[in-house]
Image (spheres, coloured by chain):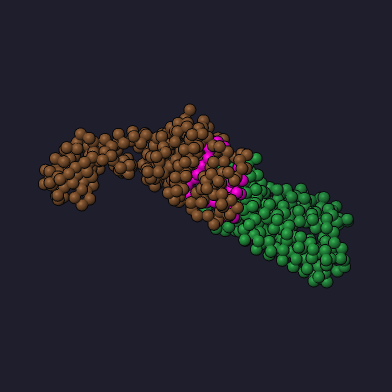
Chain colours: A brown, B green
Amino acid sequence: MAAIELEGVRKSFGDVRALRGVDLDVEEGEIFGFLGPNGAGKSTTINVILDFVRPDAGSARVLGHDAREESVAVRERTGVLPEGFHLYDRLTAREHLEFAIDSKDADDDPYPLLERVGLEEAVDRKAGGFSTGMQQRLALAMALVGDPELLILDEPSSGLDPNGARELRRIVEAEADAGATVFFSSHILGQVEAVCDRVGIIRDGELVAVDSIEGLRENVAGGSALVVEVDAVPDDALHRVKSLDGVSEATVDGTTFRVTCDDDVKMDVVQALEDAGADVSDFSTEEAPLEDLFAAYTEGAA
Amino acid sequence: MSWSAVARKDFWDAIRSRLLLVLTVLFALFAAGAAFFVTEIDAGGPFVGELTTILLIAGLVSATAIFIPIVSIAAAYRSLAGERESGSLKLLLSLPNSRADVVVGKFAGRAAVVSVALLVGFAVGLIVTAALADAFSPLEYVVFVGVSLLFAFVFVAITVGVSAFTSSASRAAYGAFGLFVVFQFLWGVLAQGVVYVLNGFSFEGIEQGDALLNLYEFLVIVDPTTAYQQATLWVVRQLAEEGEGQGMAAELPFYAQDWFGFVVMAVWVALPLAIGYLRFESSDL
């Protein structure tokens, strides 16, 4: 059974079509990375899953429940780290957890959960004085209350320092090892590629790709970049390279061309540069940086 | 019962608000001052003779009718709109709380907070009165406090209901305060206006016993502030040994009976919460 099933979900806010028919299946037990630039529809999708907003069309089922009609049942088994949340300034970290434990009817003890997210020093401090990173940790601890079967983390690494991001990754992996499904959104590919089994990429309210990182790599232009050193850059060289079939991305930095393309057009690229009047002094192939891959999906016509 | 989790959280959060502390102190000063005024100064006025608790209550009720709504609005206007504005509502609704839990829990939490503020104030008033009044009956005073709390719950419910309509705390405050002004100062005029319009834009030809006149009386009575005063009056009469005019009161239609004030207040608790819930339930966060 799928942990999250979206079918043809559409949602508009006034003139803005935030979601234009999203179909998505997240399998039980997997870590799913949900990627897209800011404003692409990530949070709207999550808000539909949590019944914060109601879709204009389509259906959403979470853990076998209808997201709209049985939202409380969904949230009883789900831990959520929402995006753009705010804590209760006058309540302590412990009181926040007690509230989550109360609401979930769980029998957790606040202290071990706070320890798990590295807030054991701040147990009885009021959240009003917390840094962004501490707020994020506290909300994560609240999400972990009651051993959720599904964790929904909306931009969880925002506000975390590299150390915090590493700890977050460890927690996500531990939850997944314990059998939980993790749905994890981000606008930065680097944050999801290390932990996610599969990745979905959303752009302009439409899901443009769902695959493993390796699968995405293979699909985009052979997944590798050609780096060509030349002596000088003729005026129309970049244009010529870009107009070749099989080239998805080309940039020039000083006298270095970086071209993302299919494997079989690499020699055509070198030839095109020579034709344009450049002397090629060196060329090599490197694996496409993930950011290029992401850009290919979110900007180009992948 | 997750509404109680929301209410508990909300109580501990709101009771630490500085605004509430200020209002509690103000209300305590007000209650003490009013008690002093009624016992010491007013005693030489028209009510010559023994100063009773009933007299004190009669003197207090017109002032509490204004003060209590202000405390209630101040304690509750941020309840839903403020959480929506800041984003803490996302945390609240990420947990398995239904939107009904949130509305009911907010009402219960804020009602508890207002109760604390008012009980502190009334306790101070009680001490002053007990020290000064000739014949003091704690029972009558306690019953008056109870009716006043019910009146406070009316304005907490109205304010929570208004707060469900907007994601701006300041708009919620204006809305709730606007309703208070309507109930307190404009209701009678509006009721007259309704009668005027229904009578073909004139007051001519309306006589005692007319359906329109009954409608007018009914409209006046369903105002929450009137209901509070009416309910207080009923309690006072019930407690008074010889209820003068009791016989006469029995002749009046049901809505003109003093006890009807309780019905009106109960409706004013339930109705705004129901409307607020319907609105909150159907809106995107």
Name the residue rendered at 43%, 32% in the picture: A25
Q: Where is residue B107 drawn, in percent x and y?
A: 64, 49
Indicate the position of residue B87 as horizontal and vertical percent values.
Answer: 52, 50
Q: Nearer the viewer, residue B158 or A2?
A: A2
State the residue in front, B30 or B22.
Answer: B22
The residue depicted at 11 percent of the width and 43 percent of the height is A275
Magenta residues?
A76-101
Q: Residue A294 occupies which quadrant of the picture?
A: top left
Is residue A90 on the magenta stretch?
yes
Q: Is residue B172 magenta?
A: no
Q: Is residue A299 left or right of residue A113?
A: left
In the drawing, does residue A260 fall left or right of residue A101? Answer: left
**Is A190 left, or right, of A88 in this rendering?**
left
- Identify the residue shown where x is 55% and y is 46%: A115
User: Where residue A223 appears, x then y in whole percent?
Assistant: 28, 37
User: Does residue A137 show up?
Assistant: yes
